[in-house]
Image (cartoon, helix red, strand yellow):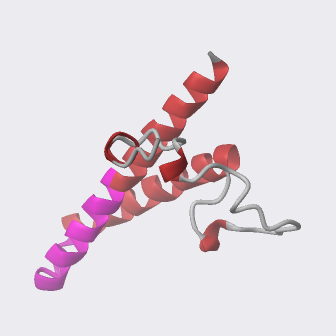
Amino acid sequence: MFQQNQAHEKSVLLKSIGEVSFVLQDLCLYLDTHPEDCAALDYYQQCLAYKEQLEEIYCSTFGPLTLNHIQNCQVWSWTEEAWPWEGDCSCGTMKSVYSFQ
């Protein structure tokens, strides 16, 4: 039961990080054409802070998301967990579409 809750929490965090990353990318495109829109720039800053908060929660619970999230690494552990195609991905299509068993 604990592993199911942890897998669900991991999935929810990854989904939220992906969603806010999309919003940030969209805001970048908007701000390229509307550089003086202070409300959009404020919203960008809020979203960026929220993304950083989500990434901090994810990294402290499940490990680094990217190389940029590795701090004070004593052991290189990227390969210690299952890869998405090995059945550990709870993110939807990868697990259901690319099942090699």
Q: Which quarter of the picture shows residue 96?
A: top left
* Residue drawn at (51%, 42%) of the image: 87
Q: Is residue 66 left or right of residue 63?
A: left
Q: As drawn, is 13 to the left or to the right of 35?
A: right
Pick the front one: 70 or 82 = 82
- Please name whichever residue, 30 or 34, is drawn nearer the observer in this view of the structure: 30
Q: Quadrant of residue 32?
A: bottom left
Tell me residue 75's x, y (percent). 85, 65
Task: Please give the range of residues in magenta.
Answer: 19-38
At horizontal 71% and vertical 68% (from top left) the residue drawn is: 70
Given residues 38 and 18, the one toward you in this image is: 18
Give coordinates of residue 59: x percent, y percent: 64, 53
Query: Is residue 31 in the magenta section?
Result: yes
Q: Residue furthest top?
A: 1
Q: Number of labelled discs?
A: 0
Residue 56 appears anywhere in the view = yes
Compared with 80, 71 (above or below) is below
**Is residue 43 in view from this perspective?**
no
26 left or right, relative to 48: left
| Quadrant including the N terminus | top right
Depth check: 44 or 58 in front?
58
Residue 72 lies, in percent from the top left, at 83, 69
* Up/down of 36 relative to 18, above or below: below
Magenta stretch encompasses residue 65: no
**Image position, residue 79 (x, y; %):** 70, 61
**Main SS type for the magenta part?**
helix
- Which residue, as the protein is rendered here, is positioned at the far left? 33
Residue drawn at the location 63% of the way across and 73% of the way down: 67
Left/right placement of residue 83 relative to residue 48 reads right
Residue in the picture at 64% in, 66% down: 69
What is the residue that sits farthest to the right in this orientation?
74
